[in-house]
Each structure stands twice: as structure tokens, then as C-alpha cells.
Amino acid sequence: MNTSLHSTGRLLWAALRALLVLTVVTGVVYPLLITAFAQAAFHDKANGSKIKAGGRVVGSELIGQSFHLKGTDRPDPRFFQPRPSNGDYDPLATGSSQLGASSPKLVKKVEAAKKEVAAFNDVPESRVPKDAVTGSASGIDPHISRAYAHLQAARVARANGLGEGQVRKLVARHTGGRTAGYMGEPHVNVLTLNVAVRELAAK
């Protein structure tokens, strides 16, 4: 009986020591090492890929946001507009509408959005690209296609008193290539492009 209790006690003590060691190693040491490595090697990414302008954080390079006239829900003509999103700078609002391509509700929504985009940019509806009227799979994509960026260039130039050529050069400068060189399409980050537009307009 005493031998059995002694063996059980030894096993419990061994288990407790293993629990304590693993808790410290996997719950404290490992996270601290990974955090230190991330801060040293990937500082910007580890902190949310924040974008600063005028000495303050204006958003994240990874999360889409709208650019409205102050105090309204109307798009600001001075800035490039993102694709439709489930949330405005809200990383929790991910996901699509779950509406199928043949859904009458989605078709009606896309048709209305196409009219709005065409009118806002003073172009025919036939020129409006798909990403201007449809959300991404994540719902918070911060990028638009080159086609949508160039569609908006003339309007942004007029609203800021800039030359259209100047704005198109900014678009080209802020166009990223395919992911890993072969996935997806070239894309433009709306936030970084708008920061550049604001800086150019302020000169």
C-alpha cells in the first residue's frame, strides 16, 4: 500500500514538474523569442504594417478603408476609392456576402454600384472594372486593380489641381507585382497611393 502511494506520488510530482517546465518553455520563453525575432527581422509587419502620414498613423497597409468626405458617407473626389468592403478599416469584418453570381440581389447591387462608379468618375459604364463593384474574398482587401486606379486618375487629378500625368505616375509607382511573381494580378495599394496624392497636392 505504502509502495503504491509512493509510486503515485512520484508520478504526480514528475507530471507537475513536466507541466511547469512546458508551461515556462512554451508559454513564456518561446513566445518571447518569436516576438523578439519578429520585432528585429520584420518590425513593420509585426506591428501591423502601419502607415504614417504627417507624423501620425493613418491606417494599415493590410486593411482596406474608405475615403469619404468628412462627416458623410459620400466618397471624397480627391482620393482614390477602394473596392466595396464589408467593413471600413475593421479587420473583424472579413468574409464575403455569400451571394452567388446569379443572385438577383447581388446583380442589382452590382448594377447600381457600376452606375455610381461611372457617374463619380465621369466615364461610361463599360469602362468600370469588376473590382470597382465587387468585394474581395476577405472583404477587407486594401488593393485595387491597375485598371480601376487608372479609371480614377483623371478625377483625382482634377479634384487636387494636379496634372493627370503626375497622378498616373504615382499609380505606376505604387503598383505592386504578382505575389511571389506568379500569383494574382498586379495591384495598387489604395492607402499608400492616397498618402502620396496628399503629399503631392500639398507641395
Image (tube, rainbow, N blue to C red):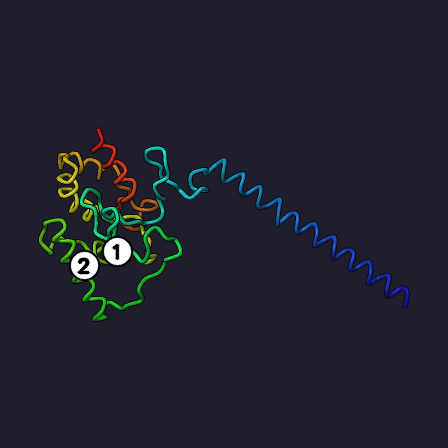
Q: Which quadrant is the C terminus positioned in?
A: top left
State the residue at coordinates (37%, 39%). Answer: 57
Seen in the image, is 133 located left or right of residue 24? left
The residue labelled by disc 2 is: 113
Q: Residue furthest front?
A: 71
Local SS, label 1: loop
Q: Residue furthest top?
A: 203
Q: Which quadrant is the N terminus positioned in?
A: bottom right
State the residue at coordinates (29%, 40%). Answer: 192
Residue 149 in the image, given as x and y percentages of width and height: 20, 45
Seen in the image, is 75 located left or right of residue 118? right
The residue labelled by disc 1 is: 84
Q: 72 or 142, which is in the foreground? A: 72
Q: 93 or 181, which is in the foreground? A: 93
N-term-proximal mark, 2 vs 1: 1
Location of residue 42 by image quarter: top left
Q: Label 1 is placed on what type of residue?
A: Pro
Q: Residues within 10 Å of mark 2 (few under 14, many from 20)?
A: some
State the residue at coordinates (13%, 37%). Answer: 164
